[in-house]
Image: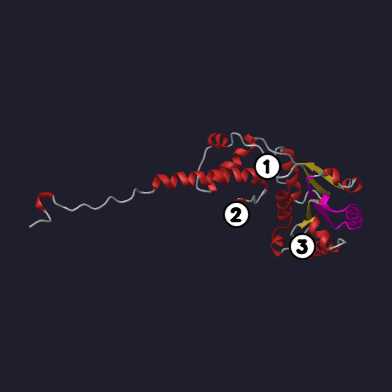
Amino acid sequence: MKFDKKHLPETLNDVIFADADVKQTLEEYANNQRHKHLLLYGPKGTGKSVSAQIVLKERMGVIWETGFGDPWNAQAYQDKWDSFDPVLQQWNMQLSMGAHTGCSVIDEIDQFTLPMQHRLRAFIDKYEMGFVIATTNNLHLVDGPLKDRFRPVFVEYPNVQQWVPRVVSVMAAEGIPVTPAQAAVLLQGFKGSGRSLNDWMEDYVFRLQRMMAQVTTPPAPAQQCAHTINGAGSK
């Protein structure tokens, strides 16, 4: 299994947020307390997509396991459909299985063309039995009237110190216990996204495994010598 898939966050507590208010807002959505369309925006690799899917998973409960909570990618969606009937069908199936409201995740919503964004606005204005959690790295490409239908939440990069608990957790899962102080040292020089952090940690794990293999590998056996002590072996 790929390193990033192996350590994919499963709950919001596994996601590192730079702003505690962002986590609080997402928890309220996950607990079915908020229902306005949600737009997570910010630089790539800040956990927007995985957070959206976790919120949907927690809202849906066992319904998630049926596949009726699978996320949509805007570009792939538009390549296949020119309406939002599939989203409406997803909501109806969720409701029929006991969901409080329908809910769909649309990643990279800015990749919808402007006419498709207009159709999405008309769709969510017409149907109120569900809502959309959308993500984008390019907020400026989202049509203004459509954006106004959403609660925009900015998700930014955590700082190095905020990443420490994530490093401690992943290293423990790899059987490499490190203290927070050691994790901070490991992170020296790191800058970037959560995806970059996965690469950073994977490199560290492989380096450490190579070092351990070199230490534990026994030396090659010495060539056997004839036993001649006290005349043994001669008659």
In the image, 145 versus 191, the foreground residue is 191
Q: Amino acid at mark 3?
A: Gly
Q: Position of residue 227 (x, y in %)?
A: 16, 53
- Furthest residue toward left: 235
Q: Amino acid at mark 2?
A: Lys
Please count the marks in the image.
3
Q: In this image, 18 relative to 106: left or right?
A: left
> Disc 3 designates what residue?
98
> Is label 1 in a helix, a strand or a loop?
loop
Can residue 203 be seen? Answer: yes
Q: Position of residue 46 (x, y in %)?
A: 71, 43
> Disc 2 designates what residue?
2
What's the CA distance linking mark 1 and mark 3?
37 Å
Q: Is residue 180 above or below residue 86?
A: above
Can residue 15 be seen? Answer: no
**Magenta-drawn segment:** 110-137
Label 1: few (<14), some or many (≥20) within 10 Å?
some
Q: Residue at x 66, y 44 (%)?
A: 194
Q: Residue at x 87, y 53 (%)?
A: 113
> Is label 3 in a helix, a strand or a loop?
loop
In reply to whether residue 136 is colored magenta, the answer given is yes
Whether tag 2 and tag 3 are in contact, CB under 8 A, the answer is no
Q: Position of residue 114 (x, y in %)?
A: 90, 52
